[in-house]
Amino acid sequence: MSATPDSSGSPMLTTPVEIPDHLTKPVGTPGPRLLEIERSKASFSPKDLELYLFGKDYIERRDRILPILENEPAFNKSRLHYMDRGEKYRFGLRKEKRLTQISMELGWDDDDMHMAEGLLDLPASFNLHRSMFMKTLRAQTTEEQKELFLRPAERYEIIGCYAQTELGHGSNVQGLETTATYQPESKTFVLQSPGLTSAKWWIGGLGRTADHAVVMAQLYTPDGKNGQLIKRGPFPFVCQLRDLKTRELLPGRTIQDIGPKAVRVFVQSRVPMVDNGTMLLDHVEIPHVNFLAGYASVDPDTGKFNRPQHDKLAYGTMVYIRANMIQQARSILARSATVAIRYCSVRRQFADRDAPQTDDGRQPAETQVINYQLVQARIFPPLVQAFAFHFTGKEMYRLYHLNEEATRAGDFSVLADVHATSSGLKSLCTLMASQAIEECRRACGGHGYSLASGLASLWSDYLPQGDSYMLTQQTGRYLFKTFRTLLADRNAPMSKENRTADYVLKYISNPEAKAPFKYVGDLSDPQLFVDAFGHRAAYLTATALRKRDIEKRSWNSILCDIFRCSTAHSQYNLVYNFAKALQEDEELKSQRALHRVMTTCFELFACQTMDTEAAEFLSSGYLSPKQHELLRNRVHDLLAELRPQAVPLVDAWNLPDYLLNSALGRQDGDVYPALVRFAQGEPLNRTRFNVDIHSDEIELGPEEGGRVSSKL
Amino acid sequence: MSATPDSSGSPMLTTPVEIPDHLTKPVGTPGPRLLEIERSKASFSPKDLELYLFGKDYIERRDRILPILENEPAFNKSRLHYMDRGEKYRFGLRKEKRLTQISMELGWDDDDMHMAEGLLDLPASFNLHRSMFMKTLRAQTTEEQKELFLRPAERYEIIGCYAQTELGHGSNVQGLETTATYQPESKTFVLQSPGLTSAKWWIGGLGRTADHAVVMAQLYTPDGKNGQLIKRGPFPFVCQLRDLKTRELLPGRTIQDIGPKAVRVFVQSRVPMVDNGTMLLDHVEIPHVNFLAGYASVDPDTGKFNRPQHDKLAYGTMVYIRANMIQQARSILARSATVAIRYCSVRRQFADRDAPQTDDGRQPAETQVINYQLVQARIFPPLVQAFAFHFTGKEMYRLYHLNEEATRAGDFSVLADVHATSSGLKSLCTLMASQAIEECRRACGGHGYSLASGLASLWSDYLPQGDSYMLTQQTGRYLFKTFRTLLADRNAPMSKENRTADYVLKYISNPEAKAPFKYVGDLSDPQLFVDAFGHRAAYLTATALRKRDIEKRSWNSILCDIFRCSTAHSQYNLVYNFAKALQEDEELKSQRALHRVMTTCFELFACQTMDTEAAEFLSSGYLSPKQHELLRNRVHDLLAELRPQAVPLVDAWNLPDYLLNSALGRQDGDVYPALVRFAQGEPLNRTRFNVDIHSDEIELGPEEGGRVSSKL
């Protein structure tokens, strides 16, 4: 032990504490051995499941890029939790530069970069430059604008951000206050913030980094009667913010970082790397060419405005972004479950109440926490939900591509259904994922609270926040429309990919249907759950629609009902896509061991979700009280059935330790020494403090060791 | 604007950004005016409700102490969010010293100190000294030990902590590994950590502050056959850790701070002030007098052990601590609701879908977020739950005092019921409070993520963590026992304060009871909900008991059922105590306006809780699907009914801005300028950065402003 006791007052600062050698071993069976035992119980090959889930290309790419990141000093995460906000920003900026350099040196493509960012899990100040800034420049520009803005951005000669949200306006783009008024005489747009609430706010990279922004502003053109200004709605404009050389702000731009955020459990350790900023624009003139006129135009000479033709095209992109979000939510569930399941397999607490006393009267040994049913009920659902999200994410990508093809051929029949479903799924999946992080963190007990748990840094700051509830109205509107159409004409033309029509038609033809199961064995048919969730979604839509169309209730007074419709519709899709994979995916069906364990995961997902939402199944009369009891008991049995496969299943996701960055979720299970190493890094341990309440001195400086008078 | 653009490269650092004068006003109706309108709608006097809730003494105490805290520079919270961990610890230590000095100067009593700590909401390094350390020294010491340890601790001449939790052991005290072995020859106990997992961990104040600890260790005494060591279970020992003068560790103690924690949304900004520590003890000898032998003894000469007599006494204290926790959870709910309700009254987003277009074709004005039913459904429940917790907390204090009197008279008849109920309530109330913080924070949209929301610092690090689920087994065991007793003999003697027996007997006499309501008007009888929640709690207990006693299922296989029993029992108590206040509290009944608004709060609490748990009411056949629909619609009507009273109701809690420390929840509603001021404090805004990816330089130093070459 290096901290030697010395009451004569050694002037030396305390050096980091070392553990006496004979106390460095945990008491009882060590974690690595416990995980080894867990792994020996696998009923399937985790490697095979990994290959099935991710495919060969993904795995090869990951295995090629991971060692590069692990060995790069600028990407070393070990000091991250000890840094203050300023250090984190600097660390993040260094990471951005180094990552850019490496990607250029090694000639990475977009997929490589995407993989690297995913494994790094360190979004920093170039985050919005790489995503929304570049994306907008690619999608909404003319060739001239590409030369002017996109090429320099690709070479990182300019660094951009995406300035949409305002202090007083979150997700309501139509309500933005910043204006862009066209002046034909100077051929410029004038950007103006009309007041404090119109300040751009939360803009990633704006605070200290970006020298350019895509600014979303309300376009006003002087083509009304007698040259009157007419409001044309929000459009994107490129605006330079800072001098490229001195980084000083250009005139009319009031810009600053908005201060510490990252309140959220899952952004705590990462968001401080991003310099979210605020900006007020005061009579900032920009040239005509800075209007990103992808789908609209303003005549430079007259100021005459031409409205965009294909509004619907943007919806396709949103479907794609939301498919990404579902896959991201899947990763978050898998990460949360990995940490919780591994740690709860290593952690032991209390003895089983039914365990016999040992012969010598001592207490029975403590049991692995994962053996408790109540713990299983909290940490297994996120695991099976991860698989559910996987299959739905995959299906959403398929539908996205299908829709892209169809719209190119002028066929918009798939779009509405896919778009509405993607809205509901975004809302549900992001909520479920954030709840899962919290549930898994709590299931880790006290250590879940430590930043060493790795559950602290699970979320991404670029997930649009706060609007997940409002979004469900889009799904609700679509469900109402579909229901009304089919109610008026059961043979109304629908795309064969339209799953909503399927279940609505089934419901209309038999609204009094009952769940057709009597024995536990009946629950082994996936179709039973597809039908049940479809019936419930239709029942809720019918109930809400009656309030709107018959009772003529206000939209606002049925918002809770609409939210429930959207949730039910989304859960139906999760169940449907998972069931379909089990029923139809030949790759899965041909591997019996995988198919078997995926079936167990599906049953737990379906039964547990149905039990959680049981009130609505019971209320419609679809489920009887007796059936509900059967179902609830089935959940308990499935938890026990899944128990021995829990560690092998999280192994199948094969999330690298570098990504998990968790003392609790380590692949090798050596939890306790890792927690101690984490503590040893704390800088506070190098200082001694003056606790004498009568002294104003706080820190005991090296030369002051003897100055404090002891009162005893 | 002070940041002047200067592309020739001014060497000046950017000074904090100032907003141009004409842009400092929010667009639209300002927040203060909106709250003023809300307040004008009050159907009752918030001041009267405040007086009814808190009483005159509490309010006088608060009003006396608050200005002292607000005006003390050491307690100024405005820089807190910008500090790194080390600064926060130092800030906390300074606060502890100053608070102690002030309390001594002004002669504060315990209630004053408790009030001050509550208003400060800044638990720091003396936290455990003041609570668990002193409490143990008061409760478990002889007169000699009081002189030796308690008096110096009261004078802050020694600073203590409470070392119970170990790295491998959270709440299972019986499983602790640290040993204390008595040696009659030297009349000392030897404290020993047997290995890494036995390291004391998470101990508040241990890391850098405390020089003494109460160490919980397994006592071994040499009074077995032939002087064999016998394990006697965990007991507290006083152990000096550091030299009082030099603060160096004494021999055999390996101690360090465990590093950053505060992962949790609600501890983020505060826990870094506490130096949670870890400690390994290696052959540390302490004198016989350091064994805190309140209820047990070890003969100094022979080492013979005498077991404590009154195990049950400790249960009374636990009831008291849990009553405190319920009151604390109440405050957390009230704080969360205050911030969310005020901010959602100021914040506007989207227009109502049913709102007419204005004549000139412009969009209708955006509506206050609090007008959305879906928002109400998220932020009103915490508000009415706060009132429910208030009445139950009050009742638990009453039962605690009643029980204290009874046990002094040798009557233990109240204890079991009160203790079991307090276990279940602790579990439920802490879970509900933490969920409410999160829900309210999300309902604030993007700004909820900012530390400026004040929802970041809502929780207390001294709340025992992670064991809220395991605890429900205590409640379950008691419910089983009571049910079995009454099933065997309906006339078995029960205390008249035993509420559990009430509902169990009612259920046993009529297990097939149905909810007696048909019209919405029927729901205005509070007794209806008392009966309904009682029936459901008994039904769940009967169902779980059948599995245990008839099906002979293992305890572990019914843990989920037991958890549900405990939750149902606790919700019954919340409903019962709230209903009882409405029915019987003369002070409330005599004030019609208060009684009226509390009745609305009760109805929303009862209906909403019943709807959330509807599956269990439906499953037992107590509630019919039709009744459930009625109930669900009633919830929506009650949200609308409560809407105009929301701001007046949070005003009644009268939580000072100093405590809320929230830009969003400000009493005056002037939200947006406060958010901007928060941003202006960010130190990053004083630095410019080098974003050139080809340069390794990160920060643009003052003299280096011109060095970076621009690429455009």
Image (cartoon, coloured by chain):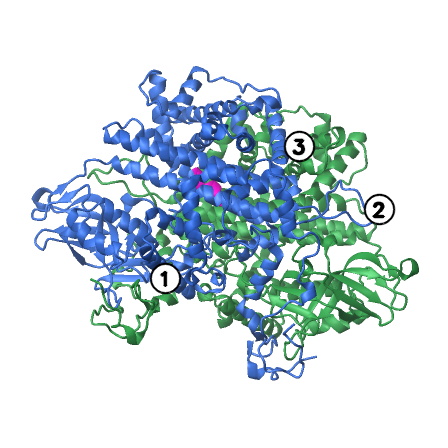
Chain colours: A green, B blue
Image coords of residue B581 (percent x, y): 46, 29
The image shows residue A611, relative to residue A167, as above or below, that is above
> On the picture, is A587 further left or further right than A75?
right
Amino acid at pointer 3 = Leu
Amino acid at pointer 1 = Leu
Q: Which residue was labeled with disc 1?
A: B93
Q: How many residues crowd mark 2 within 10 Å: few (<14), some (14–19), many (20+)?
A: few
Q: Which residue was labeled with disc 3?
A: A540
> Is B431 a magenta residue?
yes
In front: label 3 or label 2: 2
Judging depth in this view, the residue of B701 and B69 nearest the camera is B69
Question: Is residue B662 visible to the viewer in this orientation of the structure?
Answer: yes
- For the stretch drawn in magenta, what is the main secondary structure? helix
Q: Which residue was labeled with disc 2?
A: B359
Judging depth in this view, the residue of A277 and B58 nearest the camera is B58
Question: Is residue B270 visible to the viewer in this orientation of the structure?
Answer: no
Q: How many residues crowd mark 1 within 10 Å: few (<14), some (14–19), many (20+)?
A: many
Query: Could you tell me how far apart the alpha carbons at marks 3 and 2 are, in whole angstroms?
Result: 36 Å
Q: Chain of mark 2?
A: B
Q: Circle 3 — which element?
A: helix
Q: Residue at x 90, y 62 (%)?
A: A227
Q: Residue at x 48, y 35 (%)?
A: B388
Image coords of residue B434 (percent x, y): 48, 45
Query: Could you tell me how far apart the alpha carbons at marks 1 and 3 are, in whole angstroms?
Result: 56 Å
Q: Are marks 3 and 2 in contact (CB under 8 Å)?
A: no
Quadrant housing the C terminus of chain A: bottom left
Magenta residues span B428-434
Amino acid at pointer 2 = Asp
Query: Could you tell me how far apart the alpha carbons at marks 1 and 2 are, in whole angstroms?
Result: 62 Å
Q: Residue at x 35, y 56 (%)?
A: A672
Q: Are discs 3 and 2 located on one and the same chain?
A: no
Q: Circle 1 — which element?
A: helix
